[in-house]
Image (spheres, rainbow, N blue to C red):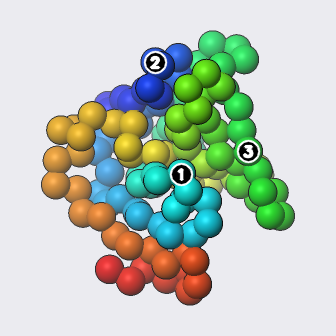
Amino acid sequence: MLSASCHCGAVQIEVPRRPRALTNCNCSMCRRYGVLWAYYRDKDVRLIAPEGAIDDYSWGRNTQRFIRCKTCGCVMQWKKHAVDAQSWTGVNARNFDPEALGDVRIKLLDGAKTWKYVG
């Protein structure tokens, strides 16, 4: 089990294991948020927060929600609006202790133009 929290500690997230890789995306949202995404099945991610502690933001065709702490603003994850058993979610790995991630490979995703991995 690997856990992370937002800056103020109000919101925590738990995942079953260290990610195999991280994604650094340069789309308009990810570039502004400065996130590194670790991907897990939605059913394997546990978001722990008191009622009213989280906020979310959807844009474009409203297919994704960016979930963040309402107090400190840290982005915790993105998830699809329509979730099913096969859905994946992106967890912001910048909220994990860097030592817990060790030497996990970072893949570069060109989300600004091609939506293809470039490195």
Q: With 87 as the anchor, is 82 left or right in this view?
A: right
The residue closer to the viewer here, 3 or 76, is 76
Q: Is residue 106 above or below residue 34?
A: below
Cα gap from disc 2 to disc 1, whole angstroms: 19 Å
Cα gap from disc 2 to disc 3, whole angstroms: 20 Å
Task: Please state the horizontal and vertical placement of residue 43, each as a whole percent of the image.
Answer: 56, 41
Q: With 42 as the anchor, is 2 left or right in this view?
A: left
Q: Residue at x 58, y 84 (%)?
A: 113
Q: In the rendered structure, which amino acid carries the disc numbered 3? A: Tyr
Q: Which residue is mark 2?
A: 9
N-terminal label among 2 and 1: 2
Residue 78, disc: none
Q: Which residue is mark 1?
A: 33
Q: Is residue 68 above or below residue 83?
A: above
Cα gap from disc 1 to disc 3, whole angstroms: 12 Å
Q: Quadrant where the N terminus lies?
A: top left
Q: In the rendered structure, which amino acid carries the disc numbered 1? A: Tyr
Q: In the rendered structure, which amino acid carries the disc numbered 2? A: Gly
Task: Please state the horizontal and vertical placement of residue 69, each as a whole percent of the image.
Answer: 60, 28
Tell me the mark number nearer the camera, choosing from 2 and 1.
Answer: 1
Tell me the mark number nearer the camera, choosing from 1 and 3.
Answer: 1
N-terminal label among 1 and 3: 1
Tag 2 and tag 1, C-beta contact below 8 Å: no
Q: Quadrant where the C terminus lies?
A: bottom left
Q: Residues within 10 Å of mark 1 (few under 14, many from 20)?
A: few
User: Label 3's element?
Assistant: strand
Q: How many marks?
A: 3
Task: Please state the horizontal and vertical placement of residue 20, each as a whole percent of the image.
Answer: 29, 57
Q: Which residue is mark 3?
A: 57
